């Protein structure tokens, strides 16, 4: 059954800013850099209680054009709930961008939500019953939005059909059992690395298109996942994201320090008529020209 309603708007807020994610809106860039995964020195600093690198990461993502900041403090051998709460409070002193609170630890998500000033995006749940039962009550309690991945305890489905079945389950459970608005469910259609199998990108695109057409919900993904293991990843990202946007992707968790990819997304917004009269594109060009001069 095709979705025929008005475009669904996922609204995120900080004390001073509102960001709207939607199929009729400009693409939302979620800056991914505030994350210690694979960053040894950053992990050591965080274990020692030194959060100064977060300030540099926030500045770089904001300057790169991020609309929302993903904050993850998954560092082994630390008190993650306490660390995540501190990091969120610090980030909110540095910028007024809304935050995506990113953790696999339920206690950390609650700690982050309890100190966050505004309306957050929570990253993430799967279609596993236990995971939904742990996290969806928090999402409802703190009036947040949620990223959900259509995989369950059995597998990461490689076929679009199974991903659609699990997407339907997530939306049904979240809306009917927990009273969460459909607009506040952001699906990650599972963007897999093409380094192992280039056909996975076609499955992801089919999944996006069908989720948009059947459910109308917003979608995100970890954009850098797609090019993992391949050379010249920035060029691949700059090609893939605009293609995904035409299939229904409305935001992505990505590194905003990569101008090649950010500019490709902004150019796609112009062609998709999400940048009225191209004014944002023209303003950015003028600002760049002025800075160079």
Image (tube, grey):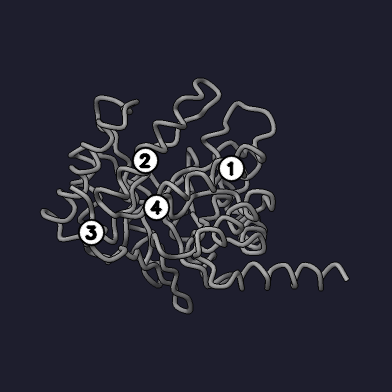
At 22% from the left and 64% from the top, the residue drawn is 141
Mark 3 or mark 4: whose residue is earlier in sequence: 3
Mark 1 or mark 3: whose residue is earlier in sequence: 3
Figure check: 129 above or below 29:
above
Reading the image, the residue beneath label 3 is 4
When asked about the image quadrant of residue 208, the answer is: top left
Q: Residue furthest right?
A: 293
Task: Provide the secondary structure element on which disc 3 rests.
Answer: loop
Q: Quadrant of the C terminus?
A: bottom right
Q: CA distance from mark 4 to mark 1?
A: 15 Å
Density class for disc 4 (Cα within 10 Å; few <14, some 14-19, many ≥20) is many
At 49% from the left and 21% from the top, the residue drawn is 197
User: Which is nearer the eye, 284 or 39?
Assistant: 284
Task: Provide the secondary structure element on which disc 4 rests.
Answer: helix
Residue 189 - label: 2
Q: CA distance from mark 4 to mark 2?
A: 28 Å
Reading the image, the residue beneath label 4 is 81
**Eye-nearest disc, 2 or 1:** 2
Mark 4 or mark 2: whose residue is earlier in sequence: 4
Reading the image, the residue beneath label 1 is 43
Q: CA distance from mark 2 to mark 3?
A: 21 Å
User: Which is nearer the eye, 272 or 104?
Assistant: 272
Is mark 3 in CB contact (under 8 Å) with mark 4? no
**Eye-nearest disc, 2 or 3:** 3
Residue 120 percent across, percent down from the top left? 38, 63
At 60% from the left and 69% from the top, the residue drawn is 278
Mark 4 or mark 1: whose residue is earlier in sequence: 1
**Eye-nearest disc, 1 or 3:** 3
Residue 204 located left or right of residue 159: right
Density class for disc 3 (Cα within 10 Å; few <14, some 14-19, many ≥20) is few
Q: CA distance from mark 2 to mark 1?
A: 29 Å
């Amino acid at each position: 059954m095709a979705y025929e309603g008005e475009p669904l708007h996922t609204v995120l807020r900080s004390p001073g800013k509102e960001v709207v994610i939607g199929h009729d809106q400009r693409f939302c860039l979620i800056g991914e850099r505030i994350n210690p995964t694979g960053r040894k020195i950053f992990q050591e600093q965080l274990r020692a209680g030194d959060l100064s690198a977060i300030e540099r990461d926030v500045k770089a993502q904001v300057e790169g054009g991020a609309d929302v900041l993903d904050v993850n403090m998954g560092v082994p051998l630390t008190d993650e709930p306490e660390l995540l709460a501190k990091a969120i409070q610090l980030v909110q002193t540095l910028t007024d961008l809304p935050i995506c609170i990113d953790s696999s630890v339920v206690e950390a998500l609650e700690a982050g939500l309890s100190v966050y000033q505004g309306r957050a995006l929570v990253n993430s749940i799967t279609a596993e019953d236990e995971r939904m039962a742990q996290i969806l009550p928090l999402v409802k309690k703190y009036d947040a939005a949620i990223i959900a991945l259509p995989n369950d305890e059995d597998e990461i489905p490689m076929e679009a059909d199974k991903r659609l079945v699990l997407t339907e389950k997530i939306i049904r459970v979240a809306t009917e059992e927990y009273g969460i608005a459909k607009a506040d469910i952001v699906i990650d259609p599972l963007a897999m690395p093409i380094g192992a199998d280039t056909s996975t990108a076609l499955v992801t695109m089919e999944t996006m298109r069908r989720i948009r057409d059947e459910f109308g919900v917003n979608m995100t993904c970890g954009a850098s996942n797609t090019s993992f293991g391949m050379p010249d990843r920035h060029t691949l990202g700059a090609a893939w994201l605009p293609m995904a946007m035409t299939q229904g992707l409305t935001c992505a968790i990505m590194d905003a320090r990569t101008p090649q990819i950010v500019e490709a997304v902004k150019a796609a917004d112009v062609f998709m008529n999400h940048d009225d009269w191209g004014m944002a594109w023209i303003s950015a060009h003028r600002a760049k020209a002025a800075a160079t001069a």
